[in-house]
Image (cartoon, rainbow, N blue to C red):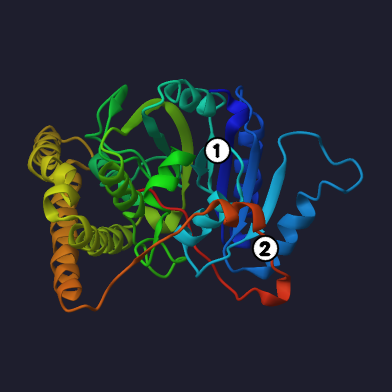
Amino acid sequence: MSGADISVVICAYTEDRWGDVLAAVASVRAQSCPAREILLVVDHNSALLQRLSREYDTSAPGAREAVPVRVLANAGPRGLSSGRNTGIAASHGGVIAFLDDDAVAERDWLARFAEAYADPLVLAVGGRTVPVWASGRRPVWFPEEFDWVVGCAYRGLPPGRVRVRNVLGGNASFRRAAFDAAGGFATGIGRDGDRRPLGCEETELCIRLARARPDAVLLLDDRAVIHHRVPHTRERFAYFRTRTFAEGLSKALVARSVGAAKGLESERRYATRVLPAGVVRGLRDALLARPGGAGRAGAIVAGLLSTAGGYALGTVRARLGGTSFTVGRITPAARTTARLPTPAAEPERAGEPVHD
């Protein structure tokens, strides 16, 4: 597969990330394996929609003849999943890749994806997301086992290019046939701006895809690297606690939909092997008087308990019928008729990319 047949979708939601969005687009345009197009999907923020439309107006004098950028409004309800579905529907590539709006891709990012899609059975490929801490370095108490909290690859993921149950967050790609077989991202399960730091929409989609296409191969290639900015607010324990609890809520929804056996397949190994080993490392570092050892061990225990608490509450809510989600529908007709709504039709606020 050539890079020319990969569409890249970037979902944006706030003008506070203006510089980040421009950097994300620039990193895609600089790929060694060029993308076919870039779709910037704005999640219910009319000011940002208009500003980005002006920035990437191809009819403006001096507009670059680089990889084209199309600016679209989220055509569905507020949230990341609907934004992604809007991008999928409007795209033309045989593969659709997703990049966070506050991340930049290394130059061979798309080339790594394209290599994997040479196998026709490969329907999804994810990469490795590296944190860029706003403070300049990782907080000493923050365990690498929980880097998924800030949308990044975490300790415990397998190295190299390997088969996985699901790809992860804002560094992922899918063959278009995957959406034809399984539908789009589910709404009501993932991010909705800064209000609910939920996740798991990729997990749910990948499990649904494996059921629809038992022969499907899903890969993780740690050479497909992006660098994800972590703001100061997410370096704090308060966010760590909130995000882990929200992850538990999301996992409960997934398990309710696809069954606990499949929905928690990877999580069991993580909780019984990866996390205990992390606690041991933290305690060892504490005994050796290394900075943050006790804090990391404590954070791992706290994160596990917080996630378990969210899962328990989410399970009760799901059984009582208080929570649900809807699978997005992606059709060829939607791809050919997608239009940019006028600013007057745009409500405010947005959704945010998240790594699961």
Q: Nearer the viewer, residue 151 or 95?
A: 95
Q: Which mark is residue 256?
A: none
Residue at image coords 88%, 48%: 60
* Mark 1 surroundings: few (<14), some (14-19) or many (≥20) residues within 10 A: many
Residue furthest to the right in view is: 61
If you read the primary sequence from the N terminus, does the residue marked by circle 2 or circle 1 appear first? 2
Residue 45 in the image: state x and y as whole percent. Answer: 62, 68
Image-based side of 189 in relation to 173, left or right: left
Residue at image coords 39%, 55%: 234
Residue 115 in the image: state x and y as whole percent. Answer: 46, 20
Residue furthest to the front in view is: 333
* Element class at badge 1: strand
Question: Based on the displayed image, in which of its 4 quarters is residue 121 positioned?
Answer: top left
Amino acid found under the numbered disc labelled 2: Leu
* Element class at badge 2: helix
Residue at image coords 33%, 45%: 139
Image-based side of 219 in relation to 271, left or right: right
Amino acid found under the numbered disc labelled 1: Val
Q: Which mark is residue 48?
A: 2
Residue 37 in the image: state x and y as whole percent. Answer: 66, 39
Q: Nearer the viewer, residue 332 or 345?
A: 332
Which residue position holds label 1?
Answer: 104
Mark pair 2, 1: CA separation: 20 Å
